[in-house]
Image (cartoon, rainbow, N blue to C red):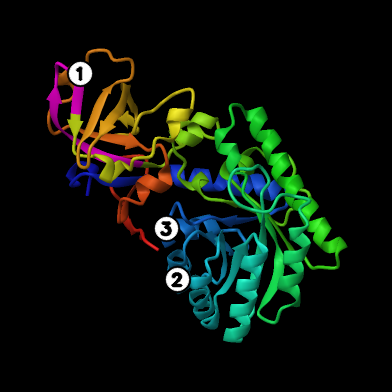
Amino acid sequence: MLISELETPALILDRSRLDRNIARMREKLSRHGVALRPHVKTAKSIEVVRRALAGQPGGITVSTLKEAEQFFVHGITDILYAVGVAPGKLDHVAALRSKGADVTVLLDSVDAAHAVANRGRALGVEFPALIEIDSDGHRSGIRPGAAALIEIGRILENASGARLRGVMTHAGGSYSCASIDAIHAIAEQERAAVVDCAAALRDAGLPCPVVSVGSTPTATFGESFTGVTEVRAGVYMLFDLVMAGLGVCAVEDIAVSVLATVIGHQPDKGWIITDAGWMALSRDRGTARQTLDQGYGLVCDAEGRPADDLIVRDTSQEHGIIADRQGRVLHAPRYPVGTQLRILPNHACATAAQHAAYHVVNGNAAIEAVWPRFGGW
């Protein structure tokens, strides 16, 4: 089957780009002697994740318990649930652990530590937990040096329903960096924060076998991983326009795109109308904060090459409005009704989440496989 035979919108995955991206990250971290724990929230596909795990210890990072369920069914047992655990989800975690999944939970407060320990004791299980560290003020976690770190560690280690497994952080602030030098700096800040917190726990007589860091920008540009036991990253497999805007990848590295079809024109407005609206592309506008605003996605021809200087300017539910980035008049006959175009996404996670499968190509127009993906929680 060829791309031209697909009913649109459809999600396209270029396997050659995927494999190149995975190999690059694997080789980088291998040179530093640190394990990679791929984050599977972007891929949500066992075919993609198996490729990412090749040559790795075998552990994954998830952002939902549905991801944990889906990948455990395929034999992956070492799972870090890297979102602060809600007390109401602990029974689900316990059920997974009872089946043989080694699920580690995440928390960042005394209250959450008590909740995990108490529920574990009530269920007769031990929940291994990491303490989340706030290394850059981006989101959640305990600031380095906070007294709560040791208090939480002692609650987890001394309770019968929990055990302390280590510390982790996510340098989400790296997504807002304006230069590669800034990413270098935040990568070192990320590393130092968790290494220092791990040392503080050990100095207090508490175990800290896991010291986990991770974001695709800091994994890509980190210059030292001394004291770190594992790195988590996910979007590096597919990449997207936000990563390209940061300088983490080139546009040519983006492995995923949405195939759309031209369904009309508004010549007086300079618009091309396609059948891929926000239901196909998502509403993510991550590049709006960057130097180059890519609208709702960068437009390419059916072979995946950027087309003129076109972006998806606006969207409604099932309609995408394509226009020249500079507002110049488009020559509509170049893109007649029925023309297929490929849209590179701002945020691979959000765009891929709109689709049930990847249509896999290998640098050409032939579809060599269809890889199912899943969504939901």
Query: Which residue has dot 3 on it?
Result: 44
Coordinates of residue 260 in the picture (x, y in percent):
23, 38
Mark 3 vs 1, N-terminal side: 3
- In percent of the image, x 53 and y 55: which residue is there? 39
Coordinates of residue 359 in the picture (x, y in percent):
30, 50
- In percent of the image, x 52 and y 66: which residue is there? 86
Which secondary structure lies at badge 1? loop
Foreground residue among 137 and 371: 137
Q: Nearer the viewer, mark 3 or mark 1?
A: 1
Labels 3 & 2 near each other (Cβ < 8 A)? no
Q: Which residues are magenta?
A: 257-272
Q: Residues within 10 Å of mark 2 (few under 14, many from 20)?
A: some
Most common secondary structure along the magenta stretch: strand
Name the kind of residue labelled 1 in the image: Gly
Name the kind of residue labelled 2 in the image: Glu
Q: Per the image, is 196 magenta?
A: no
Query: What mark, if any, has residue 270 been given in the picture?
Result: 1
Query: Which residue has dot 2 on it?
Result: 69
Coordinates of residue 169 in the picture (x, y in percent):
65, 52
Is 336 above or below relative to 189? above
Coordinates of residue 212 in the picture (x, y in percent):
67, 55
| Residue 34 falls left or right of residue 377 | right
Res 125 quadrant in image: bottom right
Q: Residues within 10 Å of mark 3 (few under 14, many from 20)?
A: many
Name the kind of residue labelled 3 in the image: Lys
